[in-house]
Image (cartoon, helix red, strand yellow):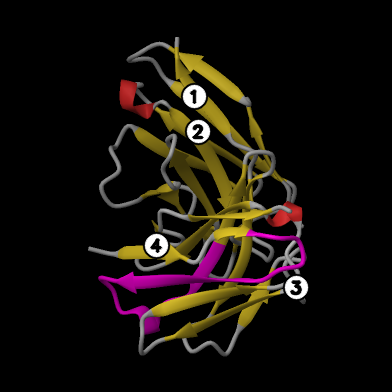
Amino acid sequence: DIVMTQSPDSLAVSLGERATINCKSSQNVFDSSNSRNLLGWYQQKPGQPPKLLIYWASARASGVPDRFIGSGSGTDFTLTISSLQAEDVAVYYCQQYYTLPFTFGQGTKLEIK
Amino acid sequence: DVQLVESGGGLVQPGGSLRLSCAASGFTFSSHWMYWVRQTPGKGLVWVSRIYIDGGVTDYADSAKGRFTISRDNAKNTVYLQMNSLRAEDTAVYYCVSSVVSPFDYWGQGTLVTVSS
């Protein structure tokens, strides 16, 4: 199975500052047949289901603010929130859908400093 | 609007069975893969199963193989997860997920399954 490892486990950032979450996969998740990294990022707030933020590593899902930026390729990926807002407090997960079983990172809890 | 509404969760004894349902609306259900993902406080998010548009292809996590069966009824816009031989470690919130425009873009609110005597 592909192991997804996020860092850090938790993060406290001041309002308006940048937040960076990393995700490393144990195997490549780049699909050369369509030139896409099969990786997504999700935001989960308490009592709610996960919400898709980023798909194919860098494409923003519909309605997602442009302060959420996904980057990376192959095995190393980053979710950046360019200017943290109070409503961004949540747990963030990465997921690979390159190969079965699809696997998630352990989550990164983002708080306000 | 796309909606996924799960039902069928509850308290069940070890070794028992449950059938989860997920009613979909707001998109052409018969044209999309459907998935089940579960979440426990201790193990986070875990993909459980998926089913192709016509039900002809199904896949399972190792933890579900031989005990869980995913199926769909495209006439009813509903996907199911039949769970047998339930164990304490199957206790989780089970989410129904679809890939309508993007992979894993819509999630239901989840249904809680508790396996306990």
Q: Secondary structure at mark 1?
A: strand
Q: Find the distance from the CA under tag 2 to the CA under tag 3.
A: 29 Å
The quadrant of the picture occupied by the N terminus of chain A is bottom right
Q: Are marks 3 and 1 on the same chain?
A: no
Side (left or right) of A83 relative to A78:
left
Question: In the rendered image, which residue does mark 1 sit on?
Answer: A110
Q: Nearer the viewer, mark 3 or mark 4?
A: 3
Residue type at the position of mark 3: Lys
Q: Locate residue B115, reporting x and y percent.
A: 68, 55
Q: Find the distance from the CA under tag 3 to the CA under tag 1.
A: 35 Å
- Residue B74: quarter of image: bottom left
Label 4 resides on the chain identified as B
Question: In the rendered image, which residue does mark 4 sit on?
Answer: B102
Residue type at the position of mark 4: Ser
Question: In the rendered image, which residue does mark 3 sit on?
Answer: B65
Q: Are marks 4 and 1 on the same chain?
A: no
Tell me what residue is drawn at x 76 percent, y 70 percent: B85
Mark positioned earlier in the residue sequence (1 or 2) = 2
**Residue in front for this viewpoint, A2 or A93:** A93
Q: Residues within 10 Å of mark 1 (few under 14, many from 20)?
A: many
State whether residue A88 is above or below residue A107.
Answer: above
Label 2 resides on the chain identified as A
Side (left or right) of A29 relative to B30:
right
Q: Is residue B28 magenta?
A: yes
Q: Find the distance from the CA under tag 4 to the CA under tag 2.
A: 21 Å
Tell me what residue is drawn at x 49 percent, y 83 percent: B72
Q: Locate residue B92, reporting x and y percent.
A: 61, 51
Residue type at the position of mark 1: Leu
Q: Are marks 2 and 3 on the same chain?
A: no
The answer to whether residue B11 of the structure is visible from this angle is yes
Kindly give the residue lying farthest to the left in the view shown: B1
Question: In the rendered image, which residue does mark 2 sit on?
Answer: A91
